[in-house]
Amino acid sequence: MPGLLLFLLAVLFGLGMGIVGFLAGRVTATAQPAAEIPASVGAPEEIAGRPEESLSGQTDDLPTAAVTTLILTETPSPPTPTGTPTPTPTPSLELTVELALPTVQAEPEITDTVVQPPDGSPLADVDFTTFYEVWDLIADEYDGSLPAADDMLDSIIVGSLETLDDDYTRYVSPDVAERMRQDQDGAVEGIGAFVIENDEGLFEIVRPIDGQPADQAGVKAGDVLIEVDGQSVLDLTFDEVILMVRGPQGTSVNLKFVREGEEDPVEFTIVRTRFEVPVVEFEILPEDMTSGATIGYIRLTEFNRNAEEKLLEALNQVIADGATGLVFDLRDNPGGFLDQSVAVADAFLPEGVALFERNIRGLDETFRTNDGDIAETLPMVVLVNSGSASASEIVAGAIQDRGRAVLIGETTFGKGSVQQIHPLSDGAELRVTIARWYTPNNNTIDGEGIAPDIEIENPEDLGGPEDGQLMRAIEYLLSGQ
């Protein structure tokens, strides 16, 4: 009998496992049907931080997998009355198969921990069943480690914003947003170079900052970064690369670039430093460059909160020094606050239109300049290049359209949209394109840029007798053509 009992147990157990295997296979193989913040206008940025521009003023755990259990029990003999001989028990087996199948509902169950979309949200009617179903399967079957919940949430947000097909409406993760806020203080730590995300989405040097580590190491304008400390950056976002290149003062970073005209990549080990990018640089140009004429030179590097103040200080000084003409340099200026761009334009322009701002929601606002400012009649030339963006283009476009001065250099970057900056609860930021701006002649530069009146190729180094754009500006002021 014991042998028979074991045989029956083996047969029934095998039969039970076969049933479970069949049912579980059906479950896994067949999908079950479902029963007051500023706004921004800038573009290129400094390697140690984007001089961010402004115009105006949690995830739940993934669903658990289905659980299949097999319970094998032996039914005991019924009790016998006291004093009655105990009969020999008859083997009696009961095989119980419990199969817990996943319940898929047409609408995900809402619990107190789930944030429901507000009325009017574009997500109010979205059925997330498929999304949870996908990650259920990934959690069960993926041959690899799963991403952290925060990383997954970030990628979901970034991916959803890409459907807008707008490069400037973007989600900024908390660590990147914190870096940007620190950069607004003016002092940054990095290698010292202006950079841009080029048309191929790659990290390209616009220009090393004179005298800073990148310049001293031999980095050049046009160099395209491909590796940081041996890690490829070709599949990383622009902000991720910025964070890799930045670092504490005194630490070193190894950078590998592709350089036009060089067959092999060029590589540099650069020691990071802490420095400030001056908002305004100014001087009376040397007489050997100006044939003895007194020509002032003012370079505005960005439109931060102090741009108007610093510009007026520089204008007062060069005028007091006897300047009879002015070269106003906006090259590689990535933009900044809208109110500052209008104020800077106002320093050079009499009463009239500075720009128009419009959107599809009916916004149609005109920004104007007023009479009586310090440099409305001073002869001047404006220098621009492909790194002149956003607020720089507002000023250059207003000066060009109103015939105040000629533009010399290269076609500008071409950013004509306005972004509103929204701080989020976890320290991240959302930057939303809320409007487009237009020059006084009602031209948009979005994606096209502003073409200069006189086109001159960008020099390798700005300033000095080797700067062809600057020398052409001096020639124009001296000859009027």
Image (spheres, rainbow, N blue to C red):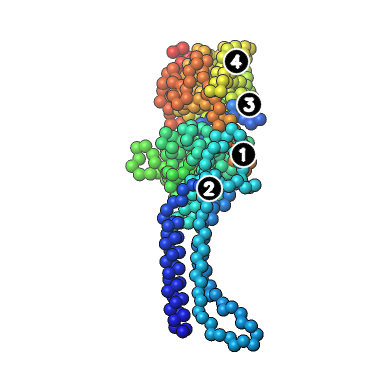
Q: Residues within 10 Å of mark 3 (few under 14, many from 20)?
A: few
Q: Which mark is residue 369?
A: 4
Q: Mark 2 or mark 1, which has the lower sequence index? A: 2
Q: CA distance from mark 3 to mark 1?
A: 18 Å
Residue 371, above or below 311: above
State the residue in front, 221 or 3. 3
Residue visible at 49% across and 40% down in the picture: 159
Q: Which mark is residue 424?
A: 1
State the residue in front, 201 or 161. 161
Q: Is residue 346 left or right of residue 44?
A: right
Q: Which mark is residue 105?
A: 2
Residue 269 screen position, x and y as percent: 47, 47
State the residue in front, 315 or 56. 56
Callouts 2 and 1 close, C-beta under 8 Å: no
Q: Mark 3 or mark 2, which has the lower sequence index? A: 3
Say which amino acid is labelled 3: Gly
Callouts 3 and 4 close, C-beta under 8 Å: no
Say which amino acid is labelled 1: Leu
Q: Mark 3 or mark 4, which has the lower sequence index? A: 3
Q: Which mark is residue 57?
A: 3
Q: CA distance from mark 1 to mark 4?
A: 35 Å
Mark 3 or mark 2: which is in front?
Answer: 2
Q: Quadrant of residue 278?
A: top right
Q: CA distance from mark 3 to mark 2?
A: 47 Å
SS at mark 4 in the image: strand
Q: Mark 1 or mark 4, which has the lower sequence index? A: 4
Residue 131 screen position, x and y as percent: 50, 46
Q: Which mark is residue 171?
A: none
SS at mark 3 in the image: loop
Residue 405 in view in this figure: no
Q: Quadrant of residue 409?
A: top left
